[in-house]
Image (cartoon, rainbow, N blue to C red):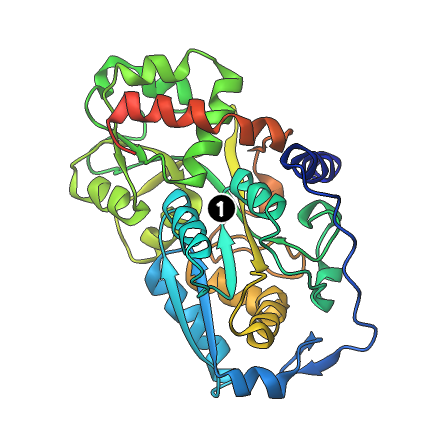
Amino acid sequence: MKSGIVLAAAVLTSAALSGASAEEAPAVCSSPSEVQGFKTCADIAKAEQEGELVFYATDVEHGTVKVLGEFEKLFPKIKTSYIRLQAGALYARLMSERQGGSHLADVFQIGDMGLVLDFQSKGGYAPYVSPELSAYKPEYLSEPKGYWTWAVLMPAGMAYNPKVVSAAEAPKDWADALDPKWHGSVSMKSANSGMQHVTWYELNKLDDTFWDKMAEQQPRAFDSMVQQFDRLVNGDDKIGLTAQYAAYLEFKNKGAPIAFVAPTSGLPSSPEVVGVVNTAPHPNAARLFLDWYLSKSGQQASVKYWFFHSPREDVAPPEGALPITKMHLLWPQDWIDFAKSRPQFLRDMRSMTGMK
């Protein structure tokens, strides 16, 4: 993957565009302690004294509760809570709170690199070089490292209900979803979704007329991937675009009638990116949680409860899933260009669906 060089350039360019000075590399903790099977430079006594951890994220709630529960089992003196919204709505809330002087978020995880770069350019991340970063490839780290880390890898394709659509009839590539027979029966994520932004961006690269043609299909947009998959199961829609592989795995694991299509031209893919917020009210608990979450055991919890792929090579993929190395992934190769495309993305989505 060539994203490492592009990411480094993107972060520096983002800072330059915003008028911010280039960030200095955070200090590296030379003597981390090992606790509960992972390495940390956090002050555990102070973290337990703070007693709270607030996680802002875009992930499904039932999985988030279980992931945070695994952390609480290890550190029962730290009570966790979370705010869960789609990427655009979550970022808007976080920025509104910051502007109003209300600082609630400790750790921030979001699946939109454009918003990640914007937050970094505004000085939103607290510098902290987790000792667990040694298990992550350079292209998964901020430049300089210690501001944010790719914690999740998310491919997306198409999905359908095999009781409603036969395998022979189902689309094999993105262009097949433009067939008039699917008119009025296609769903996708809303403009608040970071994954939808990546899908829009990458499919534009494949065919710059794709979304104009898709608009003629009158697709429906939904904030929740759970709602999107529920509609497929219930036969309300026939084809799901921007169908996250993790959601497919979760529904399949429950025995739902769902089939996944890995389009021949590739699967748009996005990371979920995590970092400590610079105004975290519980900074020691935030650093401790980040170290655990990026560790092997924390990433195993992410895989188990969210069905995500981990960037760590020592963490197996979700049960029944293809390894990420076996997929034809479509990553934005210029994150600055991706970030700049957001206004056009929002206009196109609102024109297509009438939703924000």
* Residue at figure coordinates x 50%, y 76% from the top left: 71
Decide: is 184 above or below 196: above
Residue to which mark 1 is pinned: 111
User: x, y percentage for residue 195?
Assistant: 44, 39
Amino acid type indicated by mark 1: Gly
Taking depth in this image into account, of 220 and 97 the one nearest to the observer is: 97
Helix, strand or loop at disc 1?
Answer: loop
* Residue at figure coordinates x 53%, y 19% from the top left: 205
Query: In the rendered image, is residue 121 in sight?
Result: yes
The image quadrant that residue 236 belongs to is: top left
User: x, y percentage for residue 81?
Assistant: 39, 71
Taking depth in this image into account, of 94 and 85 the one nearest to the observer is: 94
Decide: is 172 above or below 290: above
Taking depth in this image into account, of 255 and 68 the one nearest to the observer is: 68
* Residue at figure coordinates x 23%, y 40% from the top left: 232
User: x, y percentage for residue 44?
Assistant: 62, 84
- As drawn, the residue found furthest toward the right would be 30
Q: Residues within 10 Å of mark 1 (few under 14, many from 20)?
A: many
Query: In the rendered image, is residue 171 in sight?
Result: no
| Image position of 105 (left or right of 134) | left
The image quadrant that residue 7 belongs to is: top right
Looking at the figure, which quarter contains the N terminus? top right
User: x, y percentage for residue 334?
Assistant: 64, 29
